[in-house]
């Protein structure tokens, strides 16, 4: 699968910006899809306060792992930066024909669950991760599945 990457280096928001670190092609052998990897930074800064990824396409791995993954450095938590970063990905996702995305998290990850609620994602349920999935092999047995329709 060839991905038509969007010409983008930064996505500007009101409080944070997303700086493109790299794009990664898919790996069909591992059932991985292409992805954009961004650093989150406070507006006007280059200093990372977290990371966010947008995975392009649809497959079983994304049902359990999600189209969007994020992490905010501990000293910057509590400001909805992950949620604000998710919302900044809307236009990029739409440019790839993704009118809805899946976001997943572990059931005990309350901050991530709150992020999903903050962005308006709908919880579809808590599901068991199948044993053949990479996440299961890393010890993750269940996932909360959220759907965000742009």
Image (spheres, rainbow, N blue to C red):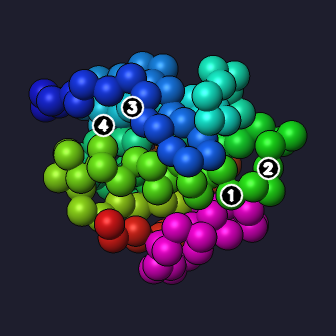
Q: Nearer the viewer, mark 3 or mark 1?
A: 1
Residue 36 shows in the view: yes
At x 49%, y 74%, the residue is 120
Earlier-in-chain disc, 3 versus 1: 3
Q: Mark 4 = which residue?
A: 33
* Dot in front, 4 or 2: 2
- Label 4 SS: loop
- Taking the image as shown, residue 38 lies to the left or right of residue 27, namely right
Gap in angstroms between the C-alphas marked 3 and 4: 10 Å
Residue 137: image quadrant is: top right
Question: How far across and down, in percent of the image, does residue 3 sit?
Answer: 17, 30
Front residue (pair 53, 60):
53
- Residue 66: image quadrant is bottom left
* Dot in front, 4 or 1: 1
Which residue, given by chain and number where applicable, does mark 1 sit on? 80
Q: Which residue is mark 2?
A: 77
Residue 51 is at least partly visible in this image? no
Mark 1 vs mark 2, CA separation in Å: 7 Å
């Amino acid at each position: 699968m060839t991905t038509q990457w969007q010409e983008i280096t930064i996505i500007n928001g009101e409080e944070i910006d997303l700086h493109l670190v790299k794009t990664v092609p898919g790996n069909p052998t591992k059932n991985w899809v292409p992805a954009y990897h961004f650093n989150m930074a406070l507006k006007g800064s280059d200093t990372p306060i977290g990371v966010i990824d947008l995975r392009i396409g649809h497959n079983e791995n994304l049902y359990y792992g999600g189209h969007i993954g994020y992490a905010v450095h501990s000293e910057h938590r509590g400001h909805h930066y992950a949620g604000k970063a998710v919302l900044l990905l809307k236009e990029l996702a739409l440019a790839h024909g993704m009118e809805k995305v899946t976001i997943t998290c572990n059931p005990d990850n309350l901050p991530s669950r709150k992020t999903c609620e903050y962005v308006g994602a709908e919880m579809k349920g808590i599901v068991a991760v199948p044993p053949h999935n990479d996440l299961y092999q890393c010890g993750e047995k269940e996932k909360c599945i959220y759907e965000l329709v742009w």
